[in-house]
Image (cartoon, grey):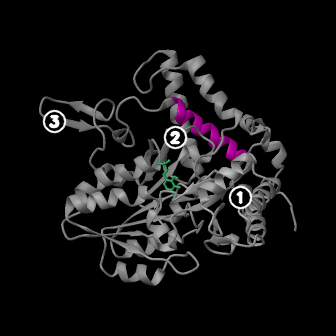
Amino acid sequence: MLKAEAFEVAKVREDFPILKRKVHGKRLVYLDNAATTQKPQLVVDALVDFYTRYNSNVHRSVHTLGEEATAAYEAARSKTAKFVGADPKGLVFVRGTTEATNLVRFAWGEKNVKKGDVLVATLMEHHSNIVPWQLLARSKGATLKYVGLNPDGTLDMGQLEDLLREAPRLVAVAHCSNVLGTINEVSAICAMAKKVGATTVVDGAQSVPHMPVDIGAVGADFYAFSGHKMLAPTGVGALAARKELLEEMDPFQSGGEMIKEVFEDHSTWNDVPYKFEAGTVNIADAIGLGTAVDYLSSIGMERVRKHEVALLDYALRALSEVKGVKIYGPPDPARRGGVVSFNYADVHPHDLATILDEEGVAIRSGHHCAQLLMRWLDVPATARASFHVYNSYDDVDALTAGLHKAGKLFRL
Ligand SMILES: Cc1ncc(COP(=O)(O)O)c(C=O)c1O
């Protein structure tokens, strides 16, 4: 099998100190990147630099530290926006994808969804792109309907077309599934939704970290992603939207910094995106996200994607050669992101993950916050290996060797 690398993985691995640690005396093989990624030293250094050199609040103090912190925080916003083809004035820093969809639920949904409206999500969504719409539908007397899947794990576009005939108020869809890896045709979906007047929410939690994304070209009204899945610290992510759309919306959280003026009986709102960044924001982690963006840009997202497609291709072939392994999602690596979900005969995925952990191999097991999808797959859980820039062919080999060991233990 061809093992060409899109860039020098061994060199990239040196940037991630955690990869030097051993687990149960074995080399750490970290394949749980869809849950969260490891951080390069550069990102850790950016946090230390902030706290040791210019820690200060932003957008308020005129002293040197305050100005430096504000400049770094806003530079992080500009870099992040550029990275995903968004307008910095329409990029709100949030805690992550979950907070972004909740922001849309409250700030857009409460104002725009009415009794009798239809909302549309898909059966492959993460709970963070389902539960907010369930709660919105419940509070407004609207109905939430789902687009089903084809047997290969792609979206049933015919069913989407049928649902669009009901003129839904909202269409919520993942750019890339965190379980099946399916890359959805989000530009086409957003264009179709727009034609019937629906507002679109695209969950980019598994796309932005792994492939070039141009939110402008996707054409989504709202696009959400999490920093911690793209080499940045936890606790920061972004919601990108058109500036005008954000301007029309009500605030999400309220208090300091999101206001322009406060009177006894009412207040006026700050300009966007600040209207949606109430209180003291997550300054250090946003700066860390900007540094992660620099790091990923220095490799180049085209090359990141190329690397993951090659690893995915290798992993799909290797796993399909293990008798008893069932892989979920589209068979073509070009149609999927860097995640492989699978089951091994009737071994519970938690048992599999425990055996692999003894070999130093970290995978995820469980329902992956996608219980509707688990029900559609008719399984309680799956095992999942997911890749990022520091994973190598050797990591896939370690996974396969671990599976063979599990097979022996379970006499498969
Ligand atoms: C597709 C998808 N959407 C949303 C989320 C939620 O992201 P966060 O927990 O960072 O809010 C995840 C995280 O696993 C995800 O994979």
- Relative to residue 80, is residue 158 drawn left or right? left
Q: Percent position (x, y) of residue 36? A: 59, 46
Point out the stretch of residues depicted in magenta.
284-298
Which residue sits at x=78%, y=67%?
Answer: 318
- Hey, which quadrant is residue 145 in on the image? bottom left
Check disc 3 and give the amino acid type.
His
- Relative to residue 137, is residue 30 drawn left or right? right
Q: Which image quarter is the N terminus in?
A: bottom right
Residue 266: mark in rendering: 3
Give above or below for 169 relative to 247: below
- Relative to residue 124, is residue 195 drawn left or right? left
Q: Which type of secondary structure does the marked residue at label 2 adopt? A: helix
Check disc 1 and give the amino acid type.
Glu
Disc with the residue nearer the chain's start (1 vs 2): 2
- The dominant secondary structure in magenta is helix
Q: Residues within 10 Å of mark 3 (few under 14, many from 20)?
A: few
User: Rounded to the nearest whole Å, what is the CA distance between mark 1 and mark 2?
Assistant: 22 Å
Which residue sits at x=20%, y=61%?
Answer: 140
Give above or below for 56 relative to 150: above
Q: Does the magenta stretch include residue 142?
A: no
Q: Can residue 211 be seen in this view?
A: no
Residue that numbered label 2 is attached to: 77
Check disc 2 and give the amino acid type.
Arg
Check contact, mark 1 vs mark 2: CB within 8 A: no
User: Rounded to the nearest whole Å, what is the CA distance between mark 3 and mark 1?
Assistant: 49 Å
- Relative to residue 98, is residue 262 drawn left or right? left
User: Rounded to the nearest whole Å, what is the CA distance between mark 3 and mark 2?
Assistant: 30 Å
Residue that numbered label 1 is attached to: 302
Give above or below for 178 relative to 317: above
Outermost top residue = 63
